[in-house]
Amino acid sequence: MLREFLRTLRVDCPPWARQLGLAREHAAIAARHERVSAAWAPHLEASHEAVLAAAARCRLRRRVLVIGAGDCLDVPVAELVGQFAEVLLADVVVSPAARRLARRFRGRLRSIVWDATGALPRLAAGRRTITLTEARLIFEQAEPGSPPGGEPDLVVSANCLSQLGLVPGHSLSAAETDDKLPDACAAAAARRHLEWLAKRSGVRVVLADCARLDIAPDGRVLKREDLRGRFGLRVPDRAWRWELAPIPEWSPDFHRVHEVGAWIDGPR
């Protein structure tokens, strides 16, 4: 826990990102990857392959925008730098890993703080009083604005769709008495993000959870929570399983596994 706390101090992020628990969430994700990196490897490889398949559809190779870049574990950064004139890593938290990539590929890659929802500063300002209905409306009506750096030829939504509203939702005071609030925020933020992506003129690839599963040691599915229908996603172009938290990472009784999809749209 101390190591995770110290990791939160090393990231660059606005005060509202810390207030909404996003620096803490980043540190938790990075720490989990360190603990179970072997279990994550097939998921990260599949994510890389999907991004490169989307890149192959691009007619122009001027700019890539990666949304939810984090530590770029699921993004083939070196390959994208080799194929495009500029790679822009965007997230509400800029990690030391992202800063190192910016130094390594100086002049070709930039790492910036950017709120893809357009809602988080307002949400943080009212986090102690906002209700479920108000939070959902904030996400639904938010305007993220134009893509940072200009319209990209490739935009990657990097395994962040289900988290855009979920983590901030858990940080609202109303979530303490309304357990439906985080999921309502997650659905509203995800649908708004997909609307924004659909307006982009370049190739778009969305890497996102389709479902969350609890799987017993003998392989039985104990619980399955659908996300694809909740977010309004079509059947993915590619799909695989991500062993997010093998026993005992999440629970001593089951593995937490995500079904992940890749949706690729735009020019061929």
Image (tube, rainbow, N blue to C red):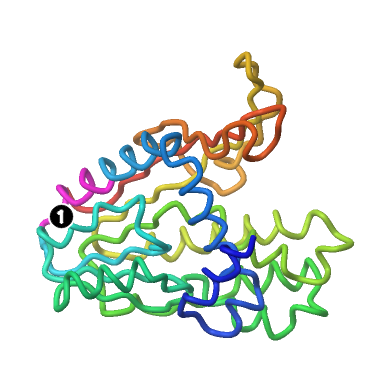
Instruction: Report which quarter residue 217 is drawn in.
Output: top right
Is residue 49 shown left or right of residue 30? left
Q: Amino acid at mark 1?
A: Cys
How far across and how far down the image is residue 168, in percent?
65, 67
How far across and how far down the image is residue 145, in percent?
42, 79
How far across and how far down the image is residue 84, in percent?
13, 63
Q: Dividing the image into 4 quarters, which one contains the N terminus?
A: bottom right
Q: Nearer the viewer, residue 5 or 134?
A: 5
Q: Which residues are magenta?
A: 51-59
**Secondary structure state at the residue bearing disc 1:** loop
- The residue wearing badge 1 is 58
The answer to whether 47 is drawn above or below residue 143 in the figure is above
Q: Is residue 29 magenta?
A: no
How far across and how far down the image is residue 235, in percent?
44, 35
The residue sitting at 46% across, 80% down in the picture is 12
The answer to whether 242 is drawn above or below residue 162 in the figure is above
